[in-house]
Image (cartoon, rainbow, N blue to C red):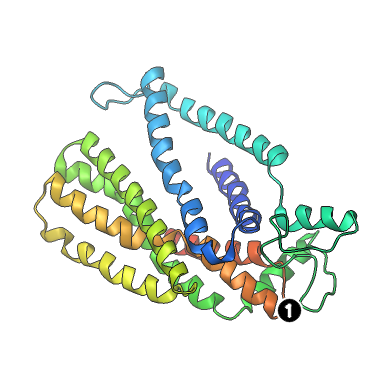
Amino acid sequence: YVPLWAVNGFVQSLGFPNLVAVTSGWVNPEKRGLVLGMWSTTGAAGDIIGLSVATHVLERSGGVGSHGSKTTEQWTNVFWAIAVYLAAVSLLLAFGVEDRAWIGLNKRREGGEEPGTDETAPLLPDAKEGAKGTKTQPPANITGVFSGLKEAWTVPGVLDWSMSYFFIKTVTYTILFWMPYYLTLTLSSQAAADNLTVLFDVAMIVGCTLLGYVTDAFGGTRSPGFFVSYIFGALPLLFLPALQRSIPHYAVAFGIIGVFTGGPAHMYGTAVSVDLGVAAAELGKPGLVSSLSGLIDGIGTLGAAVGQ
């Protein structure tokens, strides 16, 4: 079980950085924070859908009794349902999604046209061309992968954002993993704990969208908005032990935490990584968006693992 679970995590981790690189190629730079912020919250939406699907599958297969008693014979049905869903999404990505930064520009060049400024032109620097017009091929082997990560590590600002995510992802994952257990003990209600967990996910969606819009309005400057958000998000955590143990009090507290802490956490691997990728391209290091996203998200995940 442990080796299979490790392989599952490794394979899934390969997808997100490349999705960021593909998606960013279709986004107007002036709305990068808002659009990529909203796009990144699909993870929180997936938490909500996944919880609902898992509960439904277990109830239909007899894996969970009416009062929460478990009969473990059918719990693996949840993983079958997830595997089918993942296979369907993989096929959709393989045959239905174009990488605009590569395909859109190459089609115009094959037709003898120079890239213009219309809707078919890439919105990010082309990964095949350096700052001085020299062609660089994407990494095709393991040596190239490590070379890309080494280059990504030297981009100004990547260390600061990575270490910030190291700690903030610890906070958000601790809340996501331990909040249901904590609420079940304090409220003595599994249903209330599940509903409050869903509320936290919804609050993260709202917070990420709002922060993306605000930071775009200030010219794409992210760090001041992150700082203010974390100050407001930390306050409910400080007073959580003193709160009255009631659903309304917890709803307000975790709603605020979700908006101001969980919200910006989703922007590290998307809008922040693309910002750094654009800055790197201007310094003559194009095509590093996926490497930057993977590096920042990986360090954040390391922090979450240590925190657990």
Q: Give percent across and percent down for residue 121.
A: 73, 59
> Where is 51 relative to 140, above or below?
above
**Circle 1 sits in a helix, a strand or a loop, which is it?**
loop
Q: Nearer the viewer, residue 146 or 41?
A: 41
Could you tell whether 149 is left or right of 245 in the image? Answer: right
Report the residue at 18% width, 50% height from top. 250
Q: Give percent across and percent down for residue 66.
A: 25, 21
Q: Give percent across and percent down for residue 7.
A: 60, 45
Report the residue at 35% width, 50% height from top. 176
Q: Nearer the viewer, residue 222 or 107?
A: 107
Q: Tell me which corner region of the image, top left, top right, bottom left or bottom right, holds residue 294.
A: bottom right
Q: Tell me which corner region of the image, top left, top right, bottom left or bottom right, holds residue 258.
A: bottom left
Could you tell whether 23 is left or right of 34 in the image? Answer: right
Crowd rating for badge 1 (residues with CA inside 10 Å; few <14, some 14–19, many 20+):
some
| Residue found farthest to the front | 118
What amino acid is at disc 1? Answer: Gly
Q: Give percent across and percent down for residue 296.
A: 54, 66
Q: Can residue 110 be seen from the camera position used here?
A: yes
Report the residue at 68% width, 78% height from top. 282
Could you tell whether 129 is left or right of 211 in the image? Answer: right
Q: Tell me which corner region of the image, top left, top right, bottom left or bottom right, holds residue 55.
A: top left
Q: Can residue 169 be seen from the camera position used here?
A: no
> Where is 116 relative to 81, above or below?
below
Could you tell whether 220 is left or right of 137 in the image? Answer: left
Report the residue at 45% width, 64% height from top. 303
Q: Quadrant of the C terminus?
A: bottom left
| Residue found farthest to the left | 244
Which residue has dot 1 on it?
284
